[in-house]
Image (cartoon, grey):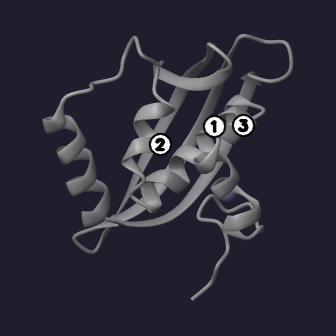
């Protein structure tokens, strides 16, 4: 078993996305937040997925929580590819990350291809929606 981070950074999980999962305020950019969300899907860290989701677009229902958990544990996460980013760093309050997330579902390779919008809410980056 590799202890490399699921996000594909080549670092160990403990020195990569686990730092974000323990404290979202350490995440310095929209891209880093996207990576940490991918890792949270791979690790079925539902608390983090909801914490890193904008309060404007987040579904707080128990039903959604369960659906998210059921789905993310039913697939095998393969890899994340960051295609491009805009802003999302330093003094910017918003940013976009275009990515491809690959996973196996029922033995078939699937890909989520999305250009996501992120913004700073309070003191940290959150996912808002797909553009
Ligand atoms: Zn990582």
Residue sitting at x 53%, y 44%: 37
Q: Earlier in the sequence, mark 2 or mark 1?
A: 1
Residue at horizontal 61%, vertical 49%? 22
Q: CA distance from mark 3 to mark 1?
A: 6 Å
**Label at residue 27:** 3
Mark 1 CB near ligand 1 (8 Å cut):
no
Q: Residue 24's mark?
A: 1
Specify whether 18 is left or right of 48.
right
Number of residues whose C-alpha sits closer than 10 Å to that of mark 2, classed few (under 14), some (14–19) or many (20 or more): some
Q: CA distance from mark 3 to mark 2?
A: 12 Å
Residues at marks 3 and 1 touching, judged by CB atoms closer than 8 Å: yes
Seen in the picture, residue 106 relative to 115 is either above or below; the reply is below
Numbered disc 2: secondary structure:
helix
Q: Extreme bottom residue here?
A: 1
Q: What is the secondary structure assignment of the residue under circle 1?
A: helix
Check contact, mark 3 vs mark 2: CB within 8 A.
Answer: no
């Amino acid at each position: 078993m590799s202890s490399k981070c699921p996000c594909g950074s080549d670092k160990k999980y403990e020195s990569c996305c686990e730092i974000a999962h323990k404290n979202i305020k350490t995440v310095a950019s929209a891209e880093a937040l996207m990576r940490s969300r991918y890792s949270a899907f791979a690790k079925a860290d539902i608390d983090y997925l909801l914490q890193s989701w904008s309060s404007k677009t987040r579904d707080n229902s128990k039903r959604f929580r369960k659906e998210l958990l059921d789905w993310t544990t039913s697939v095998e996460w393969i890899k994340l590819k960051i295609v491009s980013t805009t802003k999302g760093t330093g003094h910017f309050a918003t940013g976009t990350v275009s990515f491809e997330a690959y996973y196996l579902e029922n033995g078939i390779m699937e890909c989520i291809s999305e250009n996501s919008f992120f913004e700073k809410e309070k003191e940290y980056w959150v996912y808002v929606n797909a553009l």
